[in-house]
Image (cartoon, helix red, strand yellow):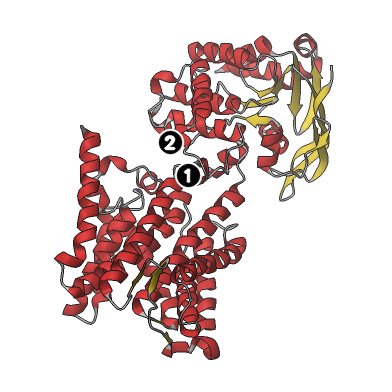
């Protein structure tokens, strides 16, 4: 299997406070790679480094054999990395249809087209409808994104992420705030839309993690504690001590 | 049915616009020309404010440069082609916007507003001090050349009626062009970037370039509006480039309603009429205008247009209120 994404000795500090302290990891093409770790382990920061929101203080990031460390956000996105956000990040005052269409316009590279009328573009409309269908958002297509239920907004977030037809999909806690029923359906959906693609995902819910993962990377204190198949992670003593048991303990205690 | 009503309404508006010179006394035709010119200026301003989420406090710089282009060309070449001169005014606006934009569009919010103000002050200082060219406060006077319609006819621009029709056609086409532009994918990109710039970047949108392009396009119409204004007045002076110009376009747009495409047009018309009316009552008309502005901002944030088309309002301004 070929390596699609690679971080080399990544460091990131915020005014002296080191959040990421030397992360080297590889993501293989076509795998579903979960990132777990206790709060403050640096999961979201790592996410933001890979997708370009933050720039690392040291280290390099390679995607498809290209150095993307210093590329601006939109260039990284155009190379085929697309992400969702932990806190819903959609276009609130646009309809669901318009939201998804924004992603589709970008995918077909018509962002700067100024000689055609967008609403008359059949190709964009067809593609937008297709994505809405996959995420069962057809019935709310004309509602404002901000007026959707929370669960539906999560679907829309996912729709924006997959509508770009990316190579690598990065999901930041896609089941955050969902009840167990919604969470199960979200997992089904994620499985469906990431078919044939590479997925990197931060997740807290261990059922979701072990249900989806081909491989798991465990972060702790800004470093990689362990990386391997779900079985290996489950058996890893250090991980149990640092993370899994602490969580179960906390759950039992509460 | 609604479609029919829609076209009927537009038909009536167009007939009314065409018959203004016959219906109203001459003093009102002057106001109508001014309202047309400022409608275009306000629409160009609103491409930034309403649709791109940028609030320039120095948009008058682009307007003033367009005005100077027209005045200086006709001053020095009284026989210059009218339409070509207006194109050059638009080009002047574009070049000014391209330069100002490089520095200002990177910034957001108050900083963007302030740096555009700084460029405006700079343009004002140049116009005031470079007396050899601009004649400073005394300004440049010229007389309007006639419009040659390809050898078929010559329209004398001594007649305010003809000035009105020429302005109506140019403003009409320009506003229509802006309206169509906003329906293109690029127009949509501007709104997407306004709504959530970070999200848009992650979808592959180049936030800076999108905003910059809108700024430059806005410059076309601001420059053109300025050119039309100078043409109408047959005069331009440094005062055309001062902050009053920039502030009045902010007022017009906010009064009319930035959330609707035609809000700035309504705002300009109301502003021009209101200004004419109260300035005949008192020399301190700015105070009353200020009060009017405050009332609109406090109680009618979607502008006067929302009294006519309340359902059309979907803007970042409203989100802040909610």
Can residue A133 be seen in the rendering of this structure? yes
Residue sitting at 46 percent across and 84 percent down? B75
**Dot 2, crowdedness within 10 Å: few (<14), some or many (≥20)?**
many
Check chain identity for marks 1 and 2: say if they share one.
no
Q: Is residue B168 left or right of residue A163?
A: left
- The spot of residue A116 in percent (x, y) is 50, 40
> Which of the two residues, B226 or A40, is positioned nearer the viewer here?
B226
Can residue B290 be seen in the rendering of this structure? no
> Which of the two residues, A158 or A187, is positioned nearer the viewer here?
A158
Q: Which mark is residue B191?
A: 1
Q: For the residue labelled by badge 1, is the local secondary structure a helix, a strand or a loop?
A: helix
Q: Is residue B101 left or right of residue B74?
A: right
- The spot of residue B34 in percent (x, y) is 30, 69
Mark 1 touches mark 2? (CB < 8 Å): yes
Q: For the residue labelled by badge 2, is the local secondary structure a helix, a strand or a loop?
A: loop
Quadrant of the image containing the N terminus of chain B:
top left
Look at the picture and state if B300 lies above or below B292: above
Residue sitting at 56 percent across and 34 percent down? A105
Which chain is indicated by disc 2?
A
> Which of the two residues, A151 or A191, is positioned nearer the viewer here?
A191
| CA gap, disc 1 and disc 2 | 9 Å
**Dot 1, crowdedness within 10 Å: few (<14), some or many (≥20)?**
many
Residue sitting at 59 percent across and 47 percent down? B207
- The spot of residue A223 in percent (x, y) is 79, 31
Which chain is indicated by disc 1?
B
Q: Which mark is residue A94?
A: 2
Quadrant of the image containing the C terminus of chain B:
top left
Look at the picture and state if A230 lies above or below B231: above
- The spot of residue A148 in percent (x, y) is 40, 27
> Which of the two residues, B71 or B190, is positioned nearer the viewer here?
B71
């Amino acid at each position: 299997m070929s390596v699609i994404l690679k971080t080399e000795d990544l460091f990131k500090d915020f005014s002296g406070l080191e959040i990421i302290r030397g992360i080297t990891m590889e993501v293989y093409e076509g795998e579903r790679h979960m990132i777990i770790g206790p709060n403050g382990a640096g999961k979201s920061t790592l996410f933001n480094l890979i997708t370009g929101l933050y720039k690392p203080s040291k280290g390099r990031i390679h995607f498809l054999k290209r150095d993307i460390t210093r590329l601006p956000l939109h260039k990284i996105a155009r190379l085929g990395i697309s992400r969702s956000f932990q806190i819903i990040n959609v276009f609130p005052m646009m309809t669901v249809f318009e939201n998804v269409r924004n992603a589709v316009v970008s995918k077909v590279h018509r962002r700067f087209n100024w000689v055609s009328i967008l609403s008359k573009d059949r190709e964009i409309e067809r593609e937008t409808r297709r994505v809405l269908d996959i995420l069962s958002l057809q019935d709310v297509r004309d509602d404002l994104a901000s007026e959707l239920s929370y669960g539906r907004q999560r679907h829309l977030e996912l729709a924006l992420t997959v509508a770009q037809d990316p190579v690598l999909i990065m999901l930041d806690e896609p089941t955050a705030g969902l009840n167990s029923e919604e969470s199960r359906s979200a997992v089904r959906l994620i499985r469906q839309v990431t078919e044939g693609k590479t997925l990197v995902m931060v997740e807290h819910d261990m059922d979701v993690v072990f249900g989806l993962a081909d491989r798991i990377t465990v972060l702790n204190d800004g470093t990689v504690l362990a990386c391997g198949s779900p079985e290996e992670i489950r058996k890893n003593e250090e991980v149990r001590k640092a993370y899994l048991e602490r969580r179960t303990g906390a759950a039992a205690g509460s | 049915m609604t479609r029919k009503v829609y076209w009927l309404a537009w038909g009536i508006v167009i007939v009314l616009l065409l018959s203004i010179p016959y219906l109203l006394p001459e003093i009102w035709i002057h106001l109508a020309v001014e309202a047309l010119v400022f409608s275009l200026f306000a629409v160009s301003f609103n491409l930034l404010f309403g649709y791109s989420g940028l609030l320039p406090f120095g948009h008058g710089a682009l307007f003033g440069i367009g005005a100077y282009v027209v005045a200086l060309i006709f001053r020095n070449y009284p026989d210059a082609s009218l339409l070509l001169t207006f194109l050059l005014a638009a080009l002047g606006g574009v070049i000014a916007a391209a330069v100002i934009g490089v520095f200002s569009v990177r910034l957001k919010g108050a900083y963007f507003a302030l740096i555009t103000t700084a460029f405006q002050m700079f343009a004002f200082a140049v116009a005031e001090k470079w007396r050899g060219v601009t004649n400073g406060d005394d300004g440049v006077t010229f007389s309007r050349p006639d419009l040659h319609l390809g050898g078929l006819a010559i329209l004398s621009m001594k007649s305010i009626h003809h000035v009105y029709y020429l302005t109506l056609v140019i403003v009409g086409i320009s506003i229509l062009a802006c309206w169509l532009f906003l329906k293109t994918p690029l127009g949509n990109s501007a709104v997407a970037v306004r709504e959530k710039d970070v999200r848009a970047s992650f979808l592959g949108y180049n936030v800076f370039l999108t905003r910059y392009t809108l700024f430059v396009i806005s410059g076309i119409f601001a420059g053109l509006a300025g050119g039309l204004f100078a043409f109408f007045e047959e005069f331009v002076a440094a005062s055309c480039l001062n902050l009053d110009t920039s502030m009045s376009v902010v007022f017009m747009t906010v009064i009319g309603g930035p959330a609707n495409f035609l809000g700035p047009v309504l705002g300009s018309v109301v502003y021009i009429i209101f200004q004419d009316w109260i300035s005949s009552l008192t020399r301190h008309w700015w105070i009353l205008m200020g009060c009017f502005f405050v009332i609109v901002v406090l109680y009618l944030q979607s502008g006067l247009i929302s009294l006519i088309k309340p359902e059309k309002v979907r803007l970042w301004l409203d989100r802040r209120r909610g």
